[in-house]
Amino acid sequence: MIILKKIAIAFALSLFVIIAPANADFVDIVAKIKPSVVGIGIHTPTSQPKNVLRGTGFVIGNGHYVVTNAHVLPDELKPDLLQKMAVFIGSGKRAKVRKAEIVVTSKLYDLAILKISGAALPAMTLAGDNYQHDGSYIAFTGFPIGSVLGLYPVTHRGIIAGTTPSIVPVPSAKQMTIKMLKRMRNPYLVYQLDATAYPGNSGSAMYDMKSGDVVGIINKVFVQSTKEAVISKPSGITYAIPVKYLHQIIRENKLKIGT
């Protein structure tokens, strides 16, 4: 009996040794990533509030480029109110506003790349073009319900639960929408996650928990609206656009984002 207890204690201690360093490493990864996470929104100097947060983005390349979802961007700005696209850096009351211009958008992949003014920010590293394996541990840091809770970065973690088509066939042609028809011409694969994202997380970098490299971009609205169009009560599943499509957009537009 004494021997069994000693074995049990030794086993428990070995688990602690294995798990504790892993958690410590992840703490370091999150701390490194936070400065690269930014808010995306609108700055209106003539209105109150002056700043409106619409989603999340992350810095890449030489520190002057920001990636987010295309649906996070405003449909139009109001020049008479001096409205500008804005990127919010920092957190809480220390957050600062940077003016931004839209460099390129992709309606197909719901991705956008912005360029910001001012000094370069810490950039995240993009993973390669290969799809990640189902079961891979991932995390994402962003501003869930940021318009209400404020600019305070929050990290969620989970796994890639599956890799699925960006569209789902419907039982009847009557249920097809124009958006779905357009998507069916160019279907592509997206990640389905077991971690839950919220409005405001759209555009967050989904990254490998060990390396911190970006493997996808969280998409809470655009993909879900197509995949779950025939569901009367959406499941709340979170999806992400594989980073390979971001690489594709950069190549197709011959962008020199630097490193």
Image (cartoon, rainbow, N blue to C red):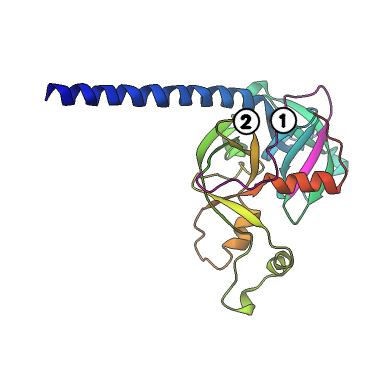
Mark 2, residue position: 151
Q: Position of residue 80 (x, y in %)?
A: 88, 42
Residue 30, position as x, y percentages in the image:
57, 27
The numbered mark, 1 or 2, whose residue comes first in the sequence reads 1
* Amino acid marked by disc 1: Phe
Which amino acid lies under the numbered mark 2 shown in the image of this protein? Leu
Q: Which segment is the magenta one?
A: 111-135
252 left or right of 54 in image: right
Quadrant in which residue 78 is drawn: top right
At 61% from the left and 31% from the top, the residue drawn is: 212
Task: Tell me if label 1 and label 2 are in contact, CB under 8 Å.
Answer: yes
Residue at the spot 76% in from the left edge and 55% down from the top edge: 107
| Residue in view at x 75 percent, y 24 percent | 121
Pick the front one: 181 or 187: 187
Looking at the rendered image, the quarter that the C terminus falls into is: top right
| 199 within the magenta span | no
Residue 88 numbered tag: 1
